[in-house]
Amino acid sequence: MKLSKLFIIFLFVPFFMSAQVNDTIKPAPVVVNVIDTSAHIIEAPSVKTTMFKVQEYQRLSHGVFSGYRIQIHFGQDRNAAKQVQSDFSGKFPYFTSYLVYQQPYFKVSVGNYRTKLDAVRCLNQIKKSYPGAFVVKEKINPPYLQ
């Protein structure tokens, strides 16, 4: 008889203990907060000075920066350079061409490319008509963004 009472006690004790534990747990209150969605940017002073220097450089250089062009002519005769530029504009109206004088030579170059890879892509089209064309690093006008 003692064994059966002991068995019943051990059988129901876990249920009573869990019932006591469950009675003391209370659900967390639900709090509705308004979330601040504004962004606050914190930057180091060195970042501000660098950005100021970049803006100042762009202001002084009038938007001109380093890039690449395709040179199609190089010579001392001005009329020949103008003729090459005119012929090029007739064959490739969608490219912008530039005539530059660097003493004592006249140079005709084409395009405004930010990367050399872009210039080489167009060079392959131009080389069919101007086999002596090559890519040069120059100051370029900012290309139009599309």
Image: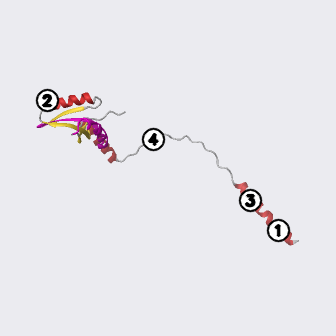
Picture residue at 67% right of the left edge, 50% below the top: 27
Residue 44 visible in the displayed image: yes
Nearest to the eye among marks 1 and 2: give it. Answer: 2
Q: Nearer the viewer, residue 90 or 70?
A: 90
Give the amino acid at mark 2.
Asn
The residue singled out by tag 3 in the image is 18
Q: State which tag comes first along the sequence, 3 or 1.
A: 1
Q: State which tag comes first along the sequence, 1 or 2.
A: 1
User: Residue 45: horizontal and vertical position, in percent?
Assistant: 33, 47
Badge number at residue 79: 2
Nearest to the eye among marks 3 and 1: give it. Answer: 1
Nearest to the eye among marks 3 and 2: give it. Answer: 2
Badge number at residue 7: 1
Q: Is residue 122 magenta?
A: yes
Q: Separation of disc 1 and disc 2 at Cα?
A: 116 Å
Quarter holding the C terminus is: top left
Sort mark 2 into few (<14), some (14-19) or many (20+) by Cα contacts within 10 Å: few
Q: Separation of disc 3 and disc 2 at Cα?
A: 102 Å
The residue singled out by tag 4 in the image is 39
Give the amino acid at mark 1.
Phe
Give the extent of the magenta segment.
Answer: 102-131
Q: State which tag comes first along the sequence, 4 or 1.
A: 1
Badge 4 marks a residue whose secondary structure is: loop
Give the amino acid at mark 3.
Ser
**Quadrant of the rendered image containing residue 4:** bottom right
**Quadrant of the rendered image containing residue 19:** bottom right
